[in-house]
Amino acid sequence: MTTKSNNTNLPLCDKYLLTLKEASLYFNIGINKIREITDDTDNDCVVFINSKRMIKRKKFEKWLDKQTYL
């Protein structure tokens, strides 16, 4: 019997990488604002898989903890 791992059933709090939509839901920030924040090339909270932008959840959380205004 072969088991398939389905990443979509994983709770967002357990995922290492989040899509923009998932990050928007998890952090309660609009997708456009997350895209704007992650447009910065010096931001290490982002990884691109081909053209798909993924958010490193824990690093983004740490970055967000330091912010007082978005």
Image (cartoon, rainbow, N blue to C red):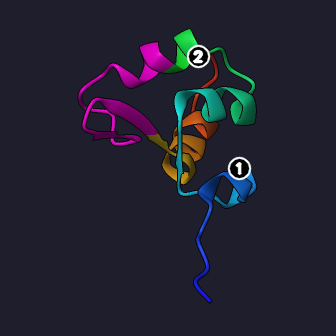
Extreme front residue here? 1
Where 51 sits versus 45, above or below?
A: above
Extreme bottom residue here? 1
Q: Position of residue 33 (x, y in %)?
A: 55, 12
Q: Position of residue 19 (x, y in %)?
A: 53, 36
Q: Position of residue 36 (x, y in %)?
A: 44, 13
Whole-number angstrom distance, CA of label 1 to CA of label 2: 16 Å
Residue 36 shown in magenta: yes
Q: Amino acid at mark 2?
A: Ile
Q: Which residues are magenta?
A: 35-54
Which residue does the numbered mark 1 point to in the structure image? 12
Depth check, front residue: 13 or 21 = 21
Depth check, front residue: 16 or 62 = 16
User: Residue at left 58%, top 84%?
Assistant: 2
Q: Which mark is residue 31?
A: 2
Quadrant of the rendered image containing residue 15: bottom right
Q: Which mark is residue 39?
A: none
Q: Amino acid at mark 1?
A: Leu
Where 20 sits versus 35, above or below?
A: below
Q: Identify the image quadrant of the C terminus.
A: top right
Quadrant of the rendered image containing residue 1: bottom right
User: Residue at left 24%, top 27%?
Assistant: 41
